Amino acid sequence: MSAVLVDATVWAEYLRGGPPDMRARVDKLLDGNRAVVCGVVLAALLAGIDGERDRRFLEECLRGVPFLEAGRDAFAVAGRMAAVLRRRGEDASLADRLLLALSREHRLTLFTLDDRLAGLARAQGVAVEATPAASPAAPVRSRRSANQRGG
């Protein structure tokens, strides 16, 4: 069984208590020690956190999840990918290109709720696991912390 790079869209929905089938899938990945996170995902999640309590909760939740470092090779692949996309009149953020580069480098499946990223991944030969997002524009918050604030 191969590992799965879980992107920020999935973690955000998971921590919000998103769709039961998606939560069950993430739980299965976590139980099997197959979920992986990287700096781009961690940074995106932390950018959506409002307060210190939520930040600590998020960091604690992800502490036991294997962490991939993006090294020189991943950045080089992401740069070459940008050049190819530009020649085709397309664009992708550095964050998305790094997710794709890491997925390819480590032969990981990318689990995302972002249709555009899923399409880019498939075009780059990256295996994709995707489900429709329940509420992609909502801010990242855990149910636990919302309940503690009375929300």
Image (spheres, rainbow, N blue to C red):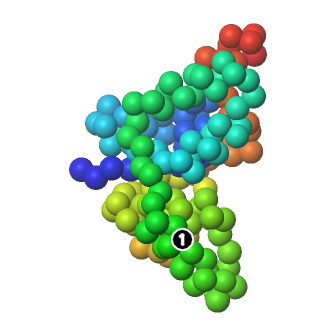
What is the tally of numbered marks visible in this picture?
1
Residue 59 x, y percent position in the rendering: 54, 29
Given the current orientation, which residue lies at the most extreme left position? 1
Q: Amino acid at mark 1?
A: Ala
Residue 90 x, y percent position in the rendering: 67, 79
Foreground of the two, 100 or 75: 75
Foreground of the two, 44 or 139: 44
Instruction: Kindly indicate the quadrant of the structure image that contains residue 89.
Output: bottom right
Instruction: Kindly indicate the quadrant of the structure image that contains residue 27.
Output: top left
**Residue drawn where x is 31% and y is 37% of the image:** 33
Instruction: Kindly indicate the quadrant of the structure image that contains residue 81.
Output: bottom right
Foreground of the two, 105 or 144: 105
Helix, strand or loop under label 1: helix
Q: Residues within 10 Å of mark 1 (few under 14, many from 20)?
A: many
Asked whether the viewer can see residue 140, the reply is yes
**Residue drawn where x is 58% and y is 84% of the image:** 84
The reply, left or right, for residue 117 in relation to residue 61 is right
Residue 79 x, y percent position in the rendering: 57, 75
Residue 3, above or below 55: below
Quadrant where the C terminus sits is top right
Mark 1 highlights which residue?
A: 78
Given the current orientation, which residue lies at the most extreme front position? 72
**Residue drawn where x is 66% and y is 83% of the image:** 86
Residue 28 x, y percent position in the rendering: 35, 35
**Residue drawn where x is 71% and y is 37% of the image:** 48
